Image (tube, rainbow, N blue to C red):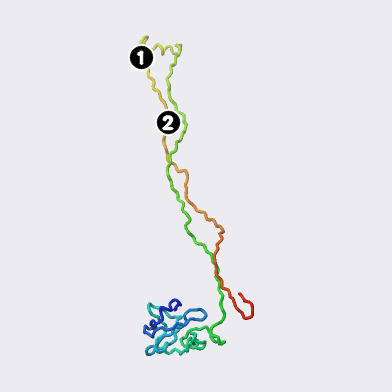
Amino acid sequence: MLSREQVPAVLDRPVYARDGSKIGEAKHVFLDDATGQPEWVTVSTGLFGSHESFVPVRDADVVEDHLEVPYDKDKVKGAPKADVEAGGHLSADEERRLYDYFEVDWGGDLAAEGGGRDDAMTLSEESMHVGVERREAGRARLRKYVVTEEVQQTIPVRHEEVRLEREPITEANRDAALSGPEISESEHEVTLHEERPVVETRTEPVERVRLATDEYTEQETVEGRVRKERIEADLQDEPDERA
């Protein structure tokens, strides 16, 4: 469909039929009174472009430097003639005949009351629809590292010390005391023992740690702007009426 912004780009440019043949050149574009969008284009045809035919543009396409319409050349040249008024408007009857000729749905009762287009205005307004989007808010990371701590532990350790024991000669030990030579030299050795702490480390698992996320819902107020259409009517001899 031809948009209003594309109108300058197609004026005086070629118009091609659906089979790729050139029909003529676009001369004038007529806008819809209600929507303000292009509705018709006149194409100069005939010898030296002496004749202009009306073609609907709702199904036309702007392709590079030309306009393409879904009709062949004979269809366009055979369109009903229309006498455009000085104000640049088609009459309701002319427009209806053109719509019927090109088999375009023109909305039924275009000229039912002689007025052509519907004179009523449609009021529109914007409404605000709020949604949510999920985005990254931060990151958490688990990192394991090693620390060394000083640990103290008290344990009992034993050691041996030598002491002299003397016992008097009695009837019970006399035989043992007299079993050796009467006078002699000798020596006796005793091995002493002691305990010392020995440190050994063992690795044992104590617990498992993982990251988990909890989701919380909060109420947040969102503000925005919406536009609304209003009607202001100037009525003769009556106060302004606003809707």
At 60% from the left and 78% from the top, the residue drawn is 234
Q: Is residue 37 visible?
A: yes
SS type, badge 2? loop
For the residues labelled 1 and 2, the Cα–Cα distance comes to: 37 Å
| Residue type at tag 1 | Ser
Q: Residue 197 bears which disc, if any? A: 2
Q: Are there few (<14), some (14-19), or many (20+) residues within 10 Å of tag 1?
A: few
Q: Earlier in the sequence, mark 1 or mark 2?
A: 1
At 44% from the left and 16% from the top, the residue drawn is 165
Query: In this figure, which residue is indicated by the disc labeled 1?
Result: 186
Quadrant location of the N terminus in the rendered image: bottom left
The quadrant in which residue 8 appears is: bottom left
| Residue type at tag 2 | Pro
Q: Are there few (<14), some (14-19), or many (20+) residues within 10 Å of tag 2?
A: few
| Residue 13 place in picture, x, y as percent | 39, 81
Relative to 169, 112 lies left or right: right
Where 186 falls versus 208 (above or below)? above
| Residue 195 place in picture, x, y as percent | 42, 28
Q: Which sits in the foreground, 145 or 165?
A: 145
The quadrant in which residue 113 appears is: bottom right
Q: Residue 35 bears which disc, if any? A: none
| Residue 45 place in picture, x, y as percent | 39, 88
SS type, badge 1? loop
At 44% from the left and 26% from the top, the residue drawn is 158
Quadrant location of the C terminus in the rendered image: bottom right
| Residue 227 place in picture, x, y as percent | 55, 70
Residue lying at the far left of the rendered structure: 185
Where 164 falls versus 154 (above or below)? above
At 45% from the left and 28% from the top, the residue drawn is 157
Residue lying at the far front of the rendered structure: 237
Q: Which sits in the foreground, 129 or 235?
A: 235
